[in-house]
């Protein structure tokens, strides 16, 4: 309800701002007035986006999952399938440019959604090419307790030089 009131207020304000003002200041050109209106519309759009994010993903139910790759000599990622509580929630097929970004240290947001507080399980299935170019499919599971705060999890792919195999793990950034 608060969101709808704020939304109607923003649209009312936008309509008031969009109506041409009286010629109170004759020195100001029409171009300057148009530029001011554009800037106000951009600011209102930004505020509306923030309100929409708060409505769709309130912090007390928010779960975000990210992916990172450290090294990548023993594993070439093709895709990831993500399930939460035995329900598929996300899948991603990687392009060469996305893989290059991950190998340079980028962290990719894989999933953002809402879950209730309590016990949950997450399973990520990694598909790609392993050592010596063989097809490789591994899964990692993680059980966690969601509290009333936002929870951020990272799916990490690292190289294990001890056994020349990739390691897959889940790291909790916040929450728990």
Image: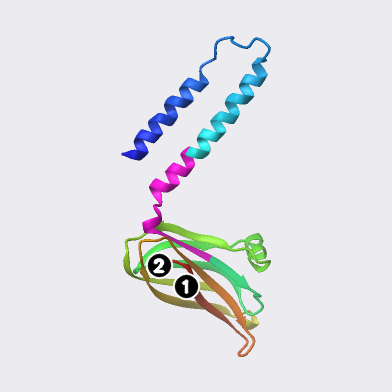
Residue 8 percent coordinates (x, y): 38, 30
The circle drawn on residue 13 is none
Residue at image position (36%, 58%) is 61
Query: Which color scheme is applied?
Result: rainbow
Residue sitting nearer the eye, 71 or 61: 61
The picture quadrant where one finds residue 151 is: bottom left
Q: Is residue 54 above or below residue 27?
A: below
Instruction: Residue 153: give x, y in percent of width and height.
Output: 48, 67
Q: Secondary structure at mark 2?
A: strand
Q: Is residue 159 magenta?
A: no
Q: Secondary structure at mark 1?
A: strand
Measured from the top left, where is residue 93 in percent x and y? 54, 62
Residue at image coords 66%, 15%: 28
The residue indicated by pointer 2 is 83
Check the image and name the residue furthest to the bottom. Answer: 162
- In the image, the segment drawn in magenta is 48-66
User: 69 and 44: which one is in front?
Assistant: 44
Q: Quadrant of residue 21?
A: top right
Residue 118 position within the rendered picture, expressed as x and y whole percent measured from the top left? 31, 67
- Give whichever of 56, 131 is nearer the camera: 56
Q: Badge 1 local density, few (<14 within 10 Å), some, or many (20+)?
A: some
The overriding secondary structure of the stretch rendered in magenta is helix
Instruction: Say if 56 sits above or below 87 in the image.
Output: above
Q: Quadrant of the C terminus?
A: bottom left
Q: Is residue 37 left or right of residue 7?
A: right
Q: Distance from label 1 to label 2 (Cα)?
A: 9 Å
Tell me whether circle 1 and circle 2 mark residues in contact (CB < 8 Å). yes
Q: Which residue appears at 57% of the width and 75% of the height?
A: 157
Q: Is 62 inside the magenta-drawn segment?
A: yes
Q: Which residue is mark 1?
A: 125
């Amino acid at each position: 309800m608060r969101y709808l009131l704020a939304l109607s207020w923003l649209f009312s304000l936008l309509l008031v701002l969009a109506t041409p003002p009286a010629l109170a200041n004759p020195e100001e050109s029409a171009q300057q007035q148009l530029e001011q209106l554009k800037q106000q519309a951009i600011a209102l759009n930004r505020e509306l986006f923030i309100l929409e994010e708060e409505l769709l993903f309130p912090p007390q139910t928010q779960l975000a999952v990210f992916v990172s790759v450290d090294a990548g000599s023993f594993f070439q990622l093709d895709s990831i399938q993500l399930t939460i509580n035995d329900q598929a929630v996300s899948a991603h097929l990687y392009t060469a440019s996305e893989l290059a970004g991950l190998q340079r240290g980028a962290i990719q947001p894989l999933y953002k959604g809402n879950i209730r507080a309590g016990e949950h399980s997450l399973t990520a299935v990694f598909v790609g090419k392993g050592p010596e170019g063989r097809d490789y499919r591994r899964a990692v599971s993680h059980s966690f307790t969601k509290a009333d705060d936002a929870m951020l999890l990272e799916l990490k792919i690292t190289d294990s030089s001890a056994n020349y195999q990739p390691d897959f793990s889940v790291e909790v950034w916040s929450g728990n």
